[in-house]
Image (cartoon, rainbow, N blue to C red):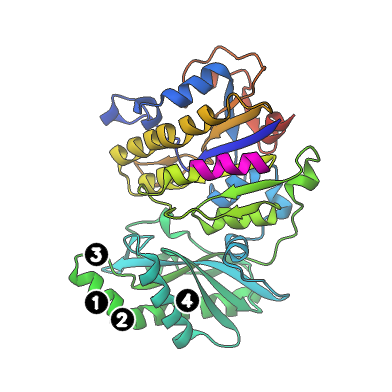
Amino acid sequence: MKYIIILGDGMADEPIPALGGKTPLQVACTPNMDLLARLGRNGRLSTVPQGFPPGSEIANLSLLGYDVRFEFEGRGSLEAASIGVALQPGEMAMRCNLICIEKGCIKNHSAGHISNQEAAELIHFLQKELGNDFIRFHAGVSYRHLLVMQGGNKQLACTPPHDVPGTLFRDVLVKALIPEAEKTAETLNHLILRSQKLLATHPVNLRRQEAGKDPANSIWPWSPGYKPAMKTLMQQYPCLKSGSVISAVDLIKGIGIYAGLESIEVEGATGLYNTNYEGKAQAAIEALRRKDFVFLHVEATDEAGHEGDVELKIRTIEYLDSRIVGPIFNAVKDWDEPVAIAVLPDHPTWCSIRTHVNEPVPFLIYKPGLPPDDVTVYDEIAAEKGSYGLLKGKEFIEQLIN
């Protein structure tokens, strides 16, 4: 049997009064996910262990079977693998957002979803101005970049910018958790303040402001860590011989690379609502012909949640259903070698607060030949009646590939 996980990042939500007390998943037209829910078995999954923040890095590692208490080393180190940056002993990596600050407050975490080309120009400029033998900036995708510090201490309190829109940035600057990390915190905060002065008058930002767009007028480093020591999925689950990861997001690509998965690039994959859904679906189908396992990640639903845009979230859920889930199921349902399909989010991203929450997510697992349970639609409420009940962490992938 082959296996595919289709992950709609942040797809789950809470009941919304404007939707008549229903969630976006309940309102969205999702005939393909509903069909798989009827044909398969359902449940809920707790992806974030107690004491951890509900970030995508924690949730995705957890649902893939990793124990984040021992194997998580920060988001930056995972994204370094995707960008192709080989971390050396003593180097600390951090996710480095380009963000928009307005009147001293964090307006958004994405600098208005700055383009790859504009962002790369700014990151290369910052490397020239701020980089040295101990500090390096590496360009990633859109607002998501990498900061590497030689000799940095990861014992820091760093705030993800998508968690605090509208907050005074000075209230959430980097703080040391132990005295030995004070120098690292001071260096990072100095870089933030220097970046604001340097970026304020950069031609890229002047052009963006003239066009009515948000400027990328500050960096924001967070989620520090060193190179992780992770077993591959194939080492953990011997029935899997090979696998692929498909995502527009460096974090997920990096997780996949450390998990031993081939990272597949899809032209036009953006991480936003305008991503190349059809290209991702076709890439997944082709990967399943060659591999045992595919992890297909779609970011668009999470970004809609961070923007607090309920209608956009509904639309991206429907895109996921009609342009990815449906085509993949129709392509593989009659293969000689059966394909098990799982659909789920990694965490909820509530539109009301525009950020992640630590609540269980609904999931479905369709396996040809496995009798279904009594659930007939796919959403947060229906999943509560699923035969899997409430699973935690690695129990999900163990049920999938058991």
Picture coordinates of residue 23, whole percent (x, y): 37, 29
User: Which segment is the magenta one?
Assistant: 281-290
Residue type at mark 4?
Answer: Asn
Residue type at mark 2?
Answer: His
Direction from residue 402 to residue 27 in the image, left or right: left
Q: Which mark is residue 213?
A: 3
Question: Alpha-carbon neighbours of circle 2 within 10 Å: few (<14), some, or many (≥20)?
Answer: some
Q: Which residue is mark 2?
A: 202
Q: Are marks 1 and 2 in contact (CB under 8 Å)?
A: yes
Residue type at mark 1?
Answer: Leu
Q: Is residue 380 magenta?
A: no
Residue type at mark 3?
Answer: Lys
Q: Which mark is residue 189?
A: 4
Which of the marked residues, 3 or 1, is nearer the chain's N terminus?
A: 1
Residue 291 location, quadrant? top right
Tell me the element at label 4.
Answer: helix
